[in-house]
Image (spheres, rainbow, N blue to C red):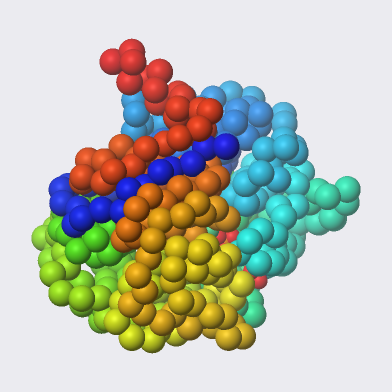
Amino acid sequence: MVRLAVVGSSPLHGTIRINGAKNACLPIMAASIMTEGRSVLMDVPCLADVHAMGDILRALGVSVQRLTDKRLSLEVTGDDQCACPHDKGIAMRASICVLGPLLARRGEALVPIPGGCVLGDRPIDLHLKGLKALGATIRKENGLIHAFAERLRGATIYLGGPRGSTCLGTANVMMAATLAEGTTVIEHAACEPEIKDLAAYLNACGARISGAGTSTVTIEGVERLTGCTHTVIPDRIEAGTFAAVAAITGGEIVLENVCPSHMAATLDVMDRMGVGFEAQGTTMRVWRDGPLRATDVNALPYPGLPTDMQPQLMAMLTVAEGVSLVTDMVYPERFAQVAEFNRLGADITREGPRAVVRGPARLTGAPVRAHDLRGGAGLILAGLAAEGITEVEDLWHVDRGYEWIEERLRAVGAGVARVGSTPVAPGQTELFRLRAAS
Ligand code: EPU
């Protein structure tokens, strides 16, 4: 069992470079299934999820090679395989991203139905609704989605659901529509920057997509897509998490390679809490020199506050002065971290769909368990603010979304150590090899 030992520390100072966004990379990698020729992606983080997507694509006939620690090459070398490997498919929700590309390019797709998780029920009905509207026949059998279509046809599709828009659902339908006959209009599309980045990649490959990043996306189908070179956008969640490191420890951290406009909602909450920040181009300085103040937090689809920042902000609220209400409209059940924060001394109660955080709590180190990626990041933050040593178990969750978390925290002065049987995170052995060879 790999865990992170975190020594509660004094204010942290230093500079951290933010990586390319995991949630932009994964659908872009899947989109490469539809291209002819090589794509080179720049600023691809070395993460367990990226590694897992690479494995899935290899099984589907895509040659995936990490050229340097941040550049990834993708090229289809065989197109007769339509089935996503079951074990890898069920292990990662983003495996659903190969559904649209396989269907559009190979006429058939077999993808395991991804399970629910600690974030609550995560249906895929909107993905299927969109692809059916493009003319696909879809059956669910033996735990698989089996989709087929000779040629997809453009359509106007309303893709909103009970919780608003869907990111990967929008990605799937948008990808499939690039090779469909005629024009597709997606209404109530997800507006997340990662969708805009996927469209930028596809357009550079020859697709004709407009409106990505707004709630109406129009796709004029084309006959073929080529490869291209594309730089992935900075990870707004990683940036928000490291901003929270500066804030919760009362330190000052300079974040490089950020896109501040993608972080407006997160920065607004931090501003209300008394955190200072100053952006200049792609660099942002974040600091705190007064006490943290309570504020209400409500996670919503973009441009609202990202649900993927909710647990990290909750960690900050545990030590803030006053009472805060935390609501998550995207994943109303995303509260697995609450019991773990309370183990560290926080005072949080669940009241229906909300968590009530009473601060400031005196946090003291204890063994805690990460139940999911962002909850794990929240626990590391709480550990940094706690007295003594906190051990965050099941660090593999965190490794899915944060590259070299311990090295990067140590670079700003944190006392952290990875403890357990494997010295490096899953998926990072490849990077280890590249580093050793250079
Ligand atoms: N939903 C439906 N039907 C669907 C799809 C989604 O009702 O067919 C609902 C979901 O249950 C949820 C809401 O719509 O309530 C939004 O889910 P969405 O589809 O947008 O989530 P996703 O695309 O599966 C991505 C990220 C998540 C992030 C969410 C929300 C990737 C690989 N994953 O998931 O990232 O939380 O968008 O922003 O892009 C993470 O990085 O830690 C993570 C969980």
The residue positioned 39% from the left and 61% from the top of the image is 364
Which corner quadrant of the image does residue 362 belong to? bottom left
Count of numbered circles on the image: 0
Q: Quadrant of the N terminus?
A: top right
x, y percentage for residue 209?
A: 45, 59
Q: Is residue 173 left or right of residue 427?
A: right
Q: Nearer the viewer, residue 430 or 129?
A: 430
- Residue situated in front as seen by the camera: 224 or 430: 430
Give the image quarter of residue 10. bottom left
Q: Is residue 418 above or below residue 120?
A: above
Left or right of residue 180, residue 87 in this image: right
Would you say residue 12 is visible in this rendering? yes
Q: Quadrant of the C terminus?
A: top left
Position of 438 relative to 252 (above/below): above
When the figure is inspected, residue 187 is found, relative to residue 237, above or below; the finding is below
Q: Position of residue 197 (x, y in %)?
A: 39, 54
Q: Quadrant of ligand 1?
A: bottom right
